[in-house]
């Protein structure tokens, strides 16, 4: 039985794309928490050792190897990109955050070049503008998303990623050009729709639709170098983000689990790039949000 469970875990890790989404969207649900299958291996190790089962212990080598192949690189020290050209911070600040000034101080303390925020609502938006202005003189807010930058921004416009069926005002993405010492970079900030887990499985259709719209916008981007910052309500392993992950680079170092802040289970806050490499992802100290901020250095392609 232990050996059979070990083989099942190895199969789910290795062939997670084969799990269908047609039934309760089980594929995306599995991929959202895929790294946690490593915990099952740890739990199986104890009984296998206690029973002195050589077969079970050998079988456990398979899921260990699969997990190490998929996620081992995230735990390695150092960065995958060398010295970064830019540092970016991504944070869903929460529309219920009671300390926007304190949140702004925590984000600015990381000394990033770019800060992307979601769930911006008045009057907190004005607090962020005032608190970040001394270090970040350039900023853009469209709807409930915003970007603060050390470098000039032009071509600021909202991006339509609203899924069908939403009638109310809904503006949760923007696109702008950052004029950096390393050249022009298209910067996208996005907040994809939330997902829910219930008796009907993973409700992610709207998120997936928005991801498709955002992916098409990135594909049509004329500038070579692109940075995407956002609360994408999904992990990079989830096939729901394939329209983005198939076109952009993701971090190869750092787990940086960002949600929920009280006990982080997944990184749904993402930093991605095209024609650039995202370095080690890390979390910043907690704020008044239910998300943790994430940060990463970005090495731009020459």
Image: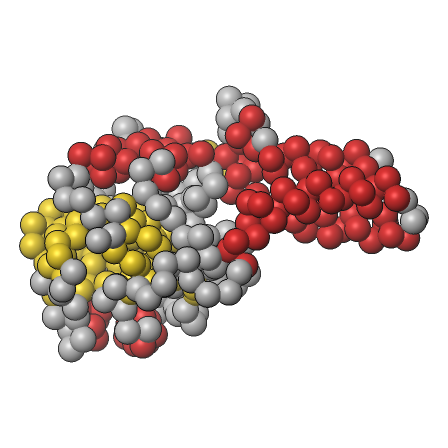
Residue 7 image point, x, y percent? 73, 35
In the image: residue 56, left or right of residue 230: right
Residue 96 vertical position relative to residue 251 in the rendered view, above or below: below
Pick the quarter of the image with the N terminus: top right
* 289 with respect to 129 (left or right): right
**Residue depicted at x 9% and y 63%:** 152
From the top left corner, tell me how far across and down residue 196 is, in percent: 47, 40
* Residue positioned 53% across, 30% down in the render: 17
* Residue at image point 79% right, 51% down: 45
Residue 125 in sight here: no
User: 243 or 286, which lies in front?
Assistant: 243
Where residue 16 sits, quadrant-wise, is: top right
Considering every residue shown, the one lying at the far front of the view is 302
Q: Nearer the viewer, residue 63 or 94?
A: 63
At x 37% / y 52%, what residue is drawn?
270
Position of residue 283 measured from the top left corner of the image (x, y, whole percent): 43, 65
- Colour pattern: secondary structure
């Amino acid at each position: 039985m232990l050996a059979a469970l070990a083989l099942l875990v190895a199969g789910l890790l290795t062939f997670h794309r084969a799990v269908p989404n047609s039934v309760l969207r089980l594929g995306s649900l599995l991929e959202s928490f895929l790294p946690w299958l490593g915990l099952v291996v740890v739990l199986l190790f104890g009984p296998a050792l206690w029973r002195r089962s050589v077969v079970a212990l050998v079988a456990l080598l398979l899921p260990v190897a699969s997990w190490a192949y998929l996620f081992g690189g995230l735990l390695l020290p150092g960065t995958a990109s060398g010295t970064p050209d830019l540092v970016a911070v991504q944070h869903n600040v929460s529309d219920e955050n009671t300390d926007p000034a304190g949140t702004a101080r925590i984000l600015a303390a990381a000394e990033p070049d770019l800060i992307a925020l979601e769930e911006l609502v008045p009057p907190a938006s004005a607090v962020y503008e005032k608190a970040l202005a001394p270090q970040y003189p350039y900023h853009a807010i469209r709807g409930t998303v915003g970007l603060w930058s050390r470098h000039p921004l032009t071509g600021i416009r909202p991006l339509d990623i609203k899924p069908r069926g939403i009638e109310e005002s809904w503006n949760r993405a923007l696109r702008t050009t950052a004029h950096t010492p390393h050249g022009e970079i298209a910067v996208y900030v996005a907040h994809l729709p939330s997902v829910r887990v219930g008796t009907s499985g993973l409700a992610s259709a709207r998120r997936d639709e928005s991801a498709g719209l955002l992916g098409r916008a990135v594909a049509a981007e004329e500038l070579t170098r692109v940075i995407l910052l956002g609360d994408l309500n999904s992990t990079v392993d989830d096939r729901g983000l394939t329209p983005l992950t198939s076109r952009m680079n993701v971090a190869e170092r750092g787990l940086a689990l960002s949600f929920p802040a009280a006990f982080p289970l997944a990184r749904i806050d993402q930093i991605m790039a095209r024609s650039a490499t995202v370095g080690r992802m890390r979390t910043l100290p907690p704020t008044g949000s239910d998300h943790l901020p994430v940060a990463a250095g970005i090495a731009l392609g020459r």
